[in-house]
Amino acid sequence: MPSEATLDAARRLARLGFLDVHADRPWEPGGARLLVALRGEPQLTHFDPEWVGYWHVVEGRGRLARLDRETHLPLEVPFSWGPIRVVDRLGVFNSFLGFGGRLGAEELDPDATIAIFASPAPIARWTGHSQAPDPLSARIGAFFARLMVPVDFVPGFEARLSAAAPLALYAAMLGEWHAELAGSAYLRESDPDSFGFVSRETNRIRAEDPAAWTEGQRILVVLGVSG
């Protein structure tokens, strides 16, 4: 019998191939979730995923993984920070950016597999065929790109990132963003919405998970940023 989470996701996906829930509002109940339906036959109504590519950790290193209808189920595994790509039978895709979390997948019935990517940090719409990008995705993508420099050149940094909690990585991004805004009255005044968002989220994480905030600040030290 599928779990209640799978049944709830299936109801939301009745006419959809995927759905990003609370994408940039991880403080909402249940956190951010990316729901995906892998069906035996295309519905031809929204988007019909054939497989999902995501990152996971193997011996402290990030590796690409693939979920499709041949994957052994049920599946309950962590996923790592980076892109998540939802691909259809023609190779068309929609992609997302996440800070890591848990991936659960179950067979709903012989014709459908339901996958749930769940995270306490954002899972932002990035690029693709069937969606507009989330405004937060540009900031997340730029932050991930900056992480790749020490990943390539600082010994042990990739393993450290791989072990970091999703909220710690999110806290590092917020800390970098806050330092940028705090250092420029022009940026704060020209983009008050971003400054308000960053201030609220930094205060929330500091209060709810001080350890994640502290680890995020340690990551920023490697990037040469004082958050």
Image (tube, rainbow, N blue to C red):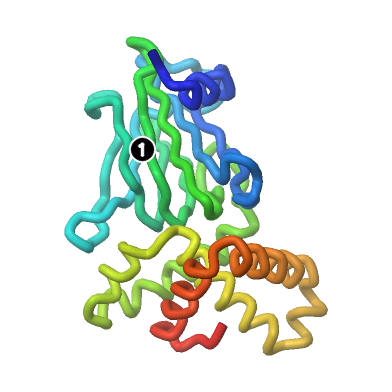
Residue pictured at 42% horizontal, 70% vertical? 145
Count of numbered marks: 1
What secondary structure is marked by label 1? strand
Where residue 144 sits, quadrant-wise, is bottom left
- Reply above or below: 187 against 193: below
Residue pictured at 49% horizontal, 33% vertical? 35
Tell me the kind of residue under disc 1. Answer: Val
From this viewpoint, which residue is outermost toward the left?
59
The picture places residue 62, in percent across and down from the top left corner, at 26, 59
Looking at the rendered image, the quarter that the C terminus falls into is: bottom right
Residue pictured at 31% horizontal, 41% vertical? 77
The picture places residue 151, in percent across and down from the top left corner, at 30, 74
Looking at the rendered image, the quarter that the N terminus falls into is: top left
- Reply above or below: 108 against 225: above
The picture places residue 79, in percent across and down from the top left corner, at 35, 48
**Residue 151 in the figure: left or right of residue 117:** left
**Residue 131 in the figure: left or right of residue 219:** right
**Residue 1 in the figure: left or right of residue 132:** left
Q: Which residue is mark 1?
A: 52
The picture places residue 118, in percent across and down from the top left corner, at 47, 42
Where residue 156 sits, quadrant-wise, is bottom left
**Residue 42 in the figure: left or right of residue 140:** left
Residue pictured at 67% horizontal, 69% vertical? 203
| Camera-nearest residue between 4 and 72 | 4
From this viewpoint, which residue is outermost toward the top?
110
